[in-house]
Amino acid sequence: SIVDAHAPSLIPASVIGGADPAVILSLPESGHVHIAIFNELGRLRSSPIEADLPAGQQRVELGRDFSPGVYLMRIYTSSKTYLIKFVL
């Protein structure tokens, strides 16, 4: 398989004290980013970000209606589209 060394990485953030679920997204480069989150059936759950973002770590708040489960995050950048599977 081909691995893109410049692909964004994603880790679930700790949920402490009833805070909304979130993930930490590491972007390899700055630019316009649109994020869409889908459930495991492919249904759009949220589009939490559409903005110009700097390179580095970004906290993406998911909202209170995200329960534990498997999700897909589609990350659209000016140069590529990425799909990352994650578990809350």
Image (spheres, grey):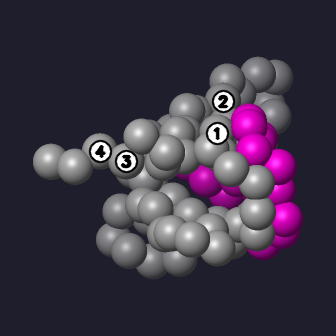
Q: Is residue 49 visible?
A: no
Mark whose residue sits in front, 3 or 1? 3
Proximity of marks 4 and 2: CB atoms separated by less than 8 Å = no
SS for tag 3? Answer: loop
In 3D space, how far apart are the residues under numbered discs 4 and 1 (Cα atoms)?
A: 16 Å
Q: Is residue 55 visible?
A: yes
The crowding category of the residue bearing disc 2, from other C-alpha atoms within 10 Å (few below 14, some 14 to 19, many at least 20), is some
Name the N-terminal-most of marks 4 and 2: 4
Q: Quadrant for residue 40, please give it.
A: bottom left
In 3D space, how far apart are the residues under numbered discs 2 and 1 (Cα atoms)?
A: 12 Å
Question: In this image, 85 relative to 58: left or right?
Answer: left
Residue at 33% x, 71% y is 41
- Type of amino acid under label 2: Ala
SS for tag 2? Answer: loop
Residues drawn in magenta: 50-69
- For the residue pair 5 and 35, the one nearer the viewer reads as 5
Q: Which mark is residue 3?
A: 4
Which residue occupies the extreme left position in the image?
Answer: 1
Q: Which mark is residue 26?
A: 1
- For the residue pair 23 and 50, the one nearer the viewer reads as 50
Question: In this image, 39 relative to 30: left or right?
Answer: left
The answer to whether residue 13 is magenta is: no
Mark whose residue sits in front, 2 or 1? 1
Residue at 82% x, 49% y is 54
In 3D space, how far apart are the residues under numbered discs 4 and 2 (Cα atoms)?
A: 24 Å
- For the residue pair 69 and 36, the one nearer the viewer reads as 36
